[in-house]
Image (cartoon, grey):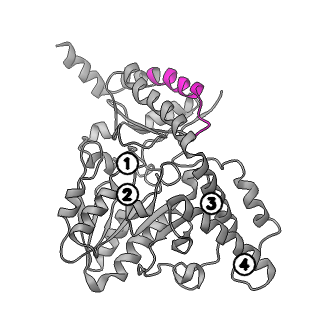
């Protein structure tokens, strides 16, 4: 059976050439970048080359890039580090209702130490209203965090407009964006966006897992969350993972060059899914914004079916997909993103996400189209809710 892997949000393959860039530092070039000898300096040069490439991907200056071990760490560093550094100015934070757990959970932790937070709602497409963000600001607000794009429903947020609304009302408020789902997949420029901090992850654009970074605008104060070393300008202690950083830099270079072609290819296949599955099966609802959407992302809610059962049944047919965020998919909870968008619990239970890459083919999409209807029908035939629905429609 040919496997069709469409869960690239959770884990993606390395881009061609990335492993070759990493290999010297996995084998002979194992020097510590903080060492003064030639082996250490060779490693340090590789780190700085990658810093330049990651910075170029998002229009930043190299010294504004802080390498971390994951997007989750980058978000924690941004939310906690910025809030703690600004505490003398206030203790109020503003975040959207659809943020990743690596933003929402640090906010909850900060609340336990005296900070306060306002959660801004979203519309039915998962979009944040810039006016609502600005309206949530108070005199003691110090930080706003709204993601660039949502990995569960694919919606791209109006970050530049949000930043303008925030800065117009309170110029001193810092704005962070979690761009893990977006960076390397859609064009991003931190100057055009106006953000003070931005999180990104190498794995999201075909780099190695364990590679990520935080953009921090020059002059912005930050309290380190991992202490004990001078690495990353004293902002993130710990010996640098040179192979991962080297791989991320190469993936960033490749992503910048290939983005237009990748976008065109994946958008066409994405739209085949968004249009085709609801035509093949009734009561299948695309989620998220169609107009403002990640090019590689197709998501749905399927009535009368549980997402876990749907995933397992598709996997049996050779198709790998996801139900919602890989960081919470085993929690057996309903997606907070879908609930924030106004979906009821029953419908949100049937969430399904397909995430594509440039090597996804028409044949792969055909396989999904063919496998999906009988899988859904078999699961619905076992559902008491579907049985009740049929009875109601026949009355």
How far across and down, in percent of the image, does residue 21 sit?
73, 59
How far across and down, in percent of the image, does residue 24 sit?
79, 64
| Residue at x 24% of width, y 22% of height | 389
Q: Secondary structure at mark 1?
A: loop
Q: Secondary structure at mark 4?
A: loop
Q: Which residue is mark 3?
A: 248
Q: How many marks?
A: 4
Report the disc number at residue 32. Answer: 4
Decide whether the magenta segment is chiefly helix, strand or loop: helix
Q: Nearer the N terminus, badge 2 or badge 1?
A: 2
Q: Which residue is mark 2?
A: 147
Q: Nearer the N terminus, badge 4 or badge 1?
A: 4
Report the disc number at residue 174. Answer: none
Q: Nearer the N terminus, badge 4 or badge 2?
A: 4
| Residue stretch in magenta | 357-373
Circle 3: is it few (<14), some (14-19), or many (20+) Cα within 10 Å? many
């Amino acid at each position: 059976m040919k496997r069709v892997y469409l869960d690239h949000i959770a884990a993606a393959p390395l881009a061609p050439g990335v492993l070759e860039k990493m290999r010297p530092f996995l084998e002979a070039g194992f020097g510590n970048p903080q060492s003064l000898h030639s082996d250490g300096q060779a490693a340090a040069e590789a780190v700085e080359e990658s810093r330049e490439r990651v910075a170029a991907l998002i229009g930043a200056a190299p010294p504004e890039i802080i390498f971390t071990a994951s997007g989750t760490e980058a978000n924690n560093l941004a939310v906690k580090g910025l809030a703690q550094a600004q505490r003398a100015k206030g203790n109020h934070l503003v975040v959207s209702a659809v943020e990743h757990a690596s933003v929402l959970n640090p906010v909850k932790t900060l609340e336990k130490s005296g900070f306060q937070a306002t959660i801004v709602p979203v519309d039915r497409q998962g979009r944040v209203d810039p006016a609502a963000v600005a309206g949530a600001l108070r005199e003691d607000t110090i930080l706003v965090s709204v993601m660039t794009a949502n990995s569960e429903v694919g919606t791209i947020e109006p970050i530049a407009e949000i930043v303008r609304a925030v800065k117009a009302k309170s110029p001193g408020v810092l704005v962070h964006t979690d761009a893990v789902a977006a960076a390397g997949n859609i064009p991003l420029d931190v100057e055009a966006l106006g953000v003070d901090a931005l999180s990104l992850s190498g794995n999201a654009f075909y780099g190695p897992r364990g590679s990520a970074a935080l953009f921090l605008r020059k002059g912005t104060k930050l309290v380190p969350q991992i202490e004990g070393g001078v690495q990353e300008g004293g902002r993130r202690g710990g010996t640098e993972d040179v192979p991962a950083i080297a791989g991320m830099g190469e993936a960033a270079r490749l992503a910048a060059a290939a983005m237009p072609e990748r976008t065109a290819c994946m958008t066409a296949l994405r739209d085949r899914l968004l249009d085709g599955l609801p035509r093949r099966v009734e009561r299948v609802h695309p989620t998220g914004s169609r107009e403002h959407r990640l090019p590689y992302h197709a998501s749905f809610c399927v009535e009368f079916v549980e997402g876990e059962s749907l995933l397992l049944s598709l996997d049996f047919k050779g198709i790998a997909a996801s139900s919602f965020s890989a960081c919470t998919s085993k929690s057996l909870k309903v997606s907070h993103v879908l609930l924030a968008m106004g979906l009821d619990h029953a419908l949100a239970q049937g969430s399904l996400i397909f995430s594509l890459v440039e090597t996804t083919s028409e044949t792969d999409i055909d396989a999904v189209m063919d496998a999906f209807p009988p899988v859904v029908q078999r699961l619905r035939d076992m559902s008491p809710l579907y049985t009740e629905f049929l009875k109601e429609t026949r009355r």
